[in-house]
Structure formats: C-alpha cells, structure tokens
Amino acid sequence: MLLAKVTNNIVQQYPYSIGLLRKDNPNTSFPKKVSIEDLAAFNVYPVEEVAPAATATQKLVKNWTPTLSAGKWILAHVVVDLSTEDIAAATAILAANAREQRDKVLRTTDWSAGSDVTMSMEMTNYRHSLREVTKQDGFPNTIVWPTLEPASVPEEPYIPEEPYIPEEPYIPEGPE
C-alpha cells in the first residue's frame, strides 16, 4: 500500500511506510497489521495511484506528489503526446524487434533449404511470407505472423545411430 505522511493537508513525506511510522514513533506499540484508522491518527494516509491508459503515440508522465481529491489522497499521472522524434525512435525499436523475431524463425527453418533437401511448396511460401512481414500495412505496430501447418513441415533425414557393420569382415588376400 502506498502511504503519505501529511500535516495540515500538506504532504510532508511521500512515499512513507509503516516501517518509517514505527521508527518515527519508537514509544508506540503498533499491531502487526496497522488499520487505516490507526494510520490516520498519526497523519499517515493511503495514496491511490491513478494511471490513465496511454496509446502508442503517448506516454505516461508520473506525478510524484499526491494531492487531496474528494477526501482521498491521489497520485494522478498525466498522459502527454510523444514528440515526432520519440514516435520515430519507438517505431524503430519495434521494427528492429520484429525483424529479429522474423530472422529467428527463419533460422529454425534453414535446414529445409539445404542442397540435399527438397523444400516443399508450403515451406517455400512460409519462408517467403516471413520475409515479407516488413511489407505489411501497419508494420511494425500490427503484424500478422504467417503460420506453417505441422503436416507441411518435412521430416529431417533419417540418420542411423550405429554404422552398418557386415557380418563377415573383409580380409584381403595377400602374399604368403
């Protein structure tokens, strides 16, 4: 719980804690769980944090001083619009993260592009769709990631665990 120490409706200390209340009043015995009424007797009040929702082009600016509103101490934050530079920087970060995610997924399918493997049309289309993610409308804020059906994923080639050993070893004939 957020707390503030208040005197004459002026915040003296924020944030404040029950530990500080105990330290400031060493000759007072407090219960393990201090009630709201007990806190008020020492001019300590709960603070409610109010954070409105911000969009992708806005940011939340925190207000660090509680204010009294309708009998409650409120820590109200403000939503402000981002600057053009901030929006460009945030978009660049989102785009870089999306490209990194796309490249990671592509790397998991690289084995299917080897010269000794015939890539299925579904896999070809999937890999092409991954590369085209950056051309989607709304990129990087809105991305529709392509999917690959499990039946479309070719099996990796079978490699036996033990080498083949003939039953009768070959013994070359040589001079005696």
Image: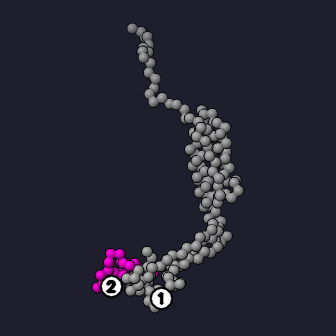
Q: Quadrant of the N terminus?
A: bottom left
Residue visible at 60% across and 34% down? 117
Across and down, in percent, residue 41 comes to: 38, 86
Q: Is residue 15 visible?
A: no
Question: Mark 2 and mark 1: span between their CA atoms?
Answer: 20 Å
Across and down, in percent, residue 64 comes to: 51, 79
Q: Quadrant of the C terminus?
A: top left
- The colour scheme is one colour
| Identity, as a three-letter code, of the amino acid under mark 1 | Ile
Across and down, in percent, residue 45 comes to: 44, 82
Residue sitting at the far bottom: 8
Kindly state the secondary structure of the residue where label 1 is placed: strand
- Graded by Cα atoms within 10 Å as few (under 14), some (14 to 19) or many (20 or more), the crowding at tag 1 reads few
Residue visible at 37% across and 82% down? 38
Mark 2 sits on what residue? 25
Kindly state the secondary structure of the residue where label 2 is placed: loop
Q: Is residue 175 above or below residue 134?
A: above
Q: Which residues are magenta?
A: 14-35
Q: Is residue 25 above or below residue 111?
A: below
Q: Is residue 143 visible?
A: yes
Across and down, in percent, residue 128 comes to: 67, 45
Circles 2 and 1: CB atoms closer than 8 Å = no
User: Which is nearer the eye, 23 or 115?
Assistant: 23
Residue visible at 33% across and 81% down? 23
Q: Is residue 57 highlighted in magenta?
A: no
- Graded by Cα atoms within 10 Å as few (under 14), some (14 to 19) or many (20 or more), the crowding at tag 2 reads few
Mark 1 sits on what residue? 10
Q: Quadrant of residue 77?
A: bottom right
Q: Earlier in the sequence, mark 2 or mark 1?
A: 1
Q: Is residue 38 left or right of residue 59?
A: left
Residue visible at 59% across and 70% down? 53
| Identity, as a three-letter code, of the amino acid under mark 2 | Asn
